[in-house]
Structure formats: structure tokens, C-alpha cells
Image (cartoon, rainbow, N blue to C red):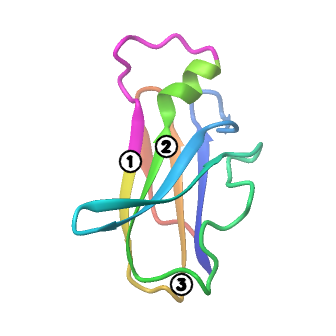
Amino acid sequence: MGLSTHVLDTMHGTPAAGMQVALLTTTNGQATPVKQFILNQDGRNPDGMLYDHASLRAGTYRLVFDVAAYFKARGVALPEPNFLNLVSLDFGVAHADQHYHVPLLVSPWSYSTYRGS
């Protein structure tokens, strides 16, 4: 239970180790930073869950993934300006007693997400 994320680099076919991510809460259009972290070798938060079961609350959240910096660090030649820079995912948690997993599959030119398990 709780909130987690995972990022896969679809260009290289690997977890997005080293990507910077920010978690924010959102209320009435205002975003409040909660934490920033760098993904580990598995493309996950090195500290585990973003919110554990006891801490997760119903509400709205935002994950911001620094896609351009990640691909530049991997040596990918990106045009200026890049097609994707920061990818922001706004999502809602309706049932805090359930697990919300927010994966991101990303390349320099596309991304997709879904509610995982």
C-alpha cells in the first residue's frame, strides 16, 4: 500500500537510473514540494515508497521527471529546445487504503504512464 513510482528508459531499454524526480502535493492549483530524489539503478526511489500506507492521503499529487537532463547525461544528442524537458504527471488518489504505483515509460520524444500495481 502507499505511493510509488518507477521509470523505464524506452530508448535504451533500461531503468532510468540517475533521473531526478520531484513529488509535490497540489491543492486548488497550488503545488507544494514534498521531496526530490534521484532514481536508483532499478529506476526507483532509493528510499522505497514515496508515501507509505499510513502517510498517504486522498488528494491530488504531481510527479515531475527531469527527462531532458537525464538523456543529456546519457550522451543523447538533443535538439534545442528539446522536445521533452520536464514531464509532469498530475494524478489523484481517491482511496488512500490502496496502492498507487505511477510508472513512467519515456524516451526523448514520447512518454506514457498508467496506474500500476
Q: Residue at x 52, y 44 (%)?
A: 105
Residue 107 can be seen, yes or no: no
Q: Residue at x 61, y 87 (%)?
A: 54
Viewed as shown, does residue 71 lie left or right of 25? right
Q: Does the magenta segment cover residue 43? A: no
Residue 1 appears in which quarter of the rendering?
A: bottom right
Question: Is disc 1 surrounded by few (<14), some (14 to 19) or many (20+) residues within 10 Å?
Answer: some
112 is higher (above) or lower (below) than 26: above
For the residue labelled by badge 1, is the local secondary structure a helix, a strand or a loop? Answer: strand
For the residue labelled by badge 3, is the local secondary structure a helix, a strand or a loop? Answer: loop
Q: Are marks 1 and 2 in contact (CB under 8 Å)?
A: yes
Residue under pointer 1: 88
What amino acid type is highlighted by mark number 1? Answer: Ser
Quarter of the rendering occupied by the C terminus: bottom right
Residue under pointer 2: 65
What amino acid type is highlighted by mark number 3? Answer: Gln
**How far separated are the C-alphas under marks 1 and 3?**
22 Å
Residue under pointer 3: 98
| Magenta span: chief secondary structure | loop
